[in-house]
Amino acid sequence: MSGSGAVPSQGHESGAGSSAGGRGQGAHHPRSLADVPIRPAATVVLLRTAPSGLEVFLQHRASGMEFAPDVTVFPGGGIEPADDGDLTVTAARETMEECGVRLDPDDLVPLSRWITPPGRPRRYDTMFYLAALPAGQEADCRTTEAVSAGWSSPRASIDSWLAGEHKLMAPTYSQLFQLLPFETVEDALGWAAESADLTPVAITDGMTREDRRFPGYAEYAAGSTIY
């Protein structure tokens, strides 16, 4: 997939691909469990400039995953002891493990910070980073956590979600929404370095916010499936 669609298509064969869900269905998983500790985590919004404009690398998670099953996400995961408390190291490690791209932690640009709501099987305090796909490298779908992966423009991914063809969590939607104005990797990275809002986003009850509306809130609330 290269800009023409939003549900990742490169990867493992599985029946858990795109799913047309009705308004408000979201992903199926427990939402009222006893609270669990919040683990630091990092996610990478991997970017490239295609002939048609800016593209992002997305993965479609397997339906059997305990956390965020059957949704479209960016590569990422929780911090490990070997990361020495550095989330940029976590981000680079997870990107290598999940899609085979080797990043320099120093090249990551912070974009936003989100905290998983209570009542989920796992909770994360996640930093989202932007990163350019390094020259000469290709991203793939090597992780067993995803059934497919590929590149898409932010607009195509959102339009596909609006059509009910795949599911987006609020954090993923918000990152895509913020990237809509940009045509090149350089433009997106430059904007984030100067203007990204790193105030933690903590959703406490569905679409209820503790403090402020996240970018794209109104569009997400009116969209296809709410996670």
Image (cartoon, rainbow, N blue to C red):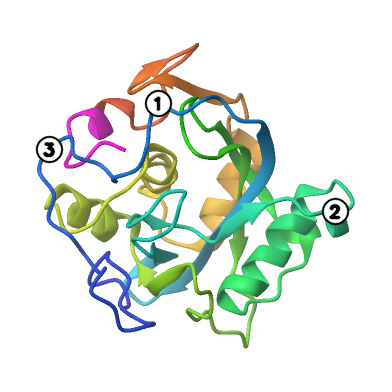
The mark lying in front, picked from 3 and 1, is 1
Q: Nearer the viewer, residue 95 or 205?
A: 205
Q: Which residue is mark 2?
A: 81
**Few, some or many C-alpha atoms within 10 Å of disc 1 (few <14, some 14-19, many ≥20)?**
few
Q: Which residue is mark 3?
A: 23
Q: Seen from this angle, which residue lies furthest top?
A: 211
Q: Is 22 situated left or right of 75 in this image?
A: left
Quadrant in which the N terminus is drawn: bottom left
**Few, some or many C-alpha atoms within 10 Å of disc 2 (few <14, some 14-19, many ≥20)?**
few
Residue for point 12% across, 56% down? 20
The kind of secondary structure element at disc 1 is loop
Which amino acid, by three-letter code, is at mark 3?
Arg
Closer to the chain start, of discs 3 and 1, is: 3
Quadrant in which the C terminus is drawn: top left
Q: Is residue 167 above or below residue 24?
A: below
Q: Is residue 110 visible?
A: yes
Does the CB distance between marks 3 and 1 fall below 8 Å? no
Closer to the chain start, of discs 3 and 2, is: 3
Q: CA distance from mark 3 to mark 1?
A: 21 Å
**Quarter location, residue 192:** top right
Q: Which residue is mark 1?
A: 32
The kind of secondary structure element at disc 2 is helix
Which amino acid, by three-letter code, is at mark 2?
Pro
Residues in magenta, as a range: 219-227
**Few, some or many C-alpha atoms within 10 Å of disc 3 (few <14, some 14-19, many ≥20)?**
some
Residue 93 at what x, y percent from top left?
72, 66
